[in-house]
Image (cartoon, grey):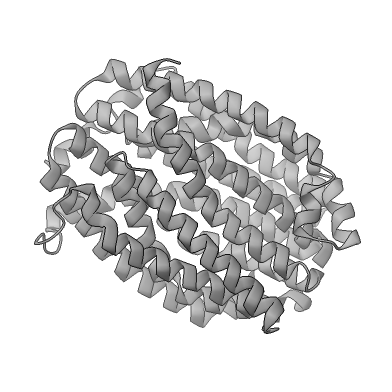
Amino acid sequence: MPSRSRRLLALALPATVTLVADPIMGLVDTAVVGRLGAAELGALGLAVSVLAAGSWVFNFLVFGTTSAVARAVGAGELPIAGRRVSHATQVALVLGVVVGGLLFLLAPVVLRGLGAVEALLEPATTYLRIRAVGIPFLLLGFVGHGAFRGVSDTRTPLGIAIGANLVNAALTFWLVLGLGIGIAGAAWATVAAEVLTVVAFAVLLRRTGLPLAGHGAPLRGELAALLAVSRDLVLRTGGLVLGLLAVAAAAARIDAETAAGYQVLYQTMLLLSFLMDGVAIAGQAMVGTALGSGDRAEARAVGRTVLRWGVGGGLALAVLLALGSGLVPRVLTDDPAVLATVGTAWWLLALGQVMNGPVYALDGVLMGAEDFAYLRTWTVLAGIVGGVAGQLVATFGGGLLGLWLAVQALMLVRLVSLVWRVRGSGWLSAGDSLGAERA
């Protein structure tokens, strides 16, 4: 195996296991709450989609921190890398408190606005309000992941993720099934895991070798540069999340079984996306470091390697899903009506991995190049296409298959735009202006 592929896999494998931690928390919640009934499972799906819109929008704390730290490390500027981590931590804390507080207060309003049927409203509100308490810890955890990825350390976050998942799983089963707290128990278990994650990162960040103390608040110019990066990443991630949220809301408009079936497909897709994003994260770190040292030829070579692994991984996942069609859905629910609904669209979920794998891989390449403006424009467009298509399916009486066709339309727009971009050379210099601002 070529050395570049070995380096990619050395970063990607621990990152993949780490990334799977978050959807595994969701799968544990889904598997346990699925035993409570279709209404609770549908409510969980809607609440999780709202949380994705409320927290994934701020994934710029991961992506921006990773790229900024990787470029600084590639250029040999460790004090600058430490300063970026310090500033991102401050921003994460402020945003987490504000967003978590608003979500706690407005949870019923948000759910009603999404058109949730009455059976879903009360359990979804309960879950959403409890999870809102953990949003500050979630965002601080984003910064921790970005710092370690930027210095090409994906093993330390792996250990933290394993510990957090063990806590989440144990507490979920105990609170929901043991004490009978219901959907609220699943929410509190996840919050406890998020708190544990932040504590572990705070203790272990010294391992990065970055000077993190004494940086103070960001100066006006530094804050402007950070906002320039966050603007494009917020719009990029927000467009994607809101597009998927629009499809989830369309499922909730139809009936509880469709909402529950969408949750099963969505959680499965989320797990698979995190499996492939391990390759994307490795590519982001390697591309960022190469461009930080001025080696564009190496950055392009890394991009080609990442794409090959994305294509192969997508094909492998498609085969595994097709073979597991009779088993995997039953892990998440035992409701016969929900299983029948899932069966109508499972084949499309499997087939879609053929295009999804390259999408996740190339997304990481452009993230490493800090080509955020291009990603923003085309991801927002993709979200609009998928969200509008999902709402039309619900309006005209479609079901879960139609909703998943809307999701795959979203992914197709992303694939075409990413392939077109990496065939050119503009992405290799996309981050030069940002680097000048940071200097």
- 410 shown above or below 56: above
On-image quarter of the C terminus: top left
Is 43 positioned to the left or the right of 419 in the image?
right
- Which image quadrant is residue 217 in? bottom left
Is 207 positioned to the left or the right of 416 in the image?
left
Q: Position of residue 384 (x, y in %)?
A: 59, 46
Residue 209 in view in this figure:
yes
Which of 247 and 351 lies nearest the eye of the viewer? 351
Q: Position of residue 211 (x, y in %)?
A: 13, 52
Q: Position of residue 36 (x, y in %)?
A: 78, 74
> Residue extending furthest left?
214
Which of 381 and 173 lies nearest the eye of the viewer? 173
Residue 369 in view in this figure:
no
- Which image quadrant is residue 89 in? bottom left
On-image quarter of the N terminus: top left
Q: Residue at x 52, y 35 (%)?
A: 360
Is 432 positioned to the left or the right of 325 in the image?
left
- 322 shown above or below 294: below
Q: Residue at x 61, y 60 (%)?
A: 26
Q: Position of residue 292 (x, y in %)?
A: 21, 30
Is 417 positioned to the left or the right of 366 in the image?
right
- 290 shown above or below 232: above
Q: Residue at x 68, y 58 (%)?
A: 248
Q: How many marks?
A: 0
- Which image quadrant is residue 204 in? bottom left
Which of 201 and 75 lies nearest the eye of the viewer? 201
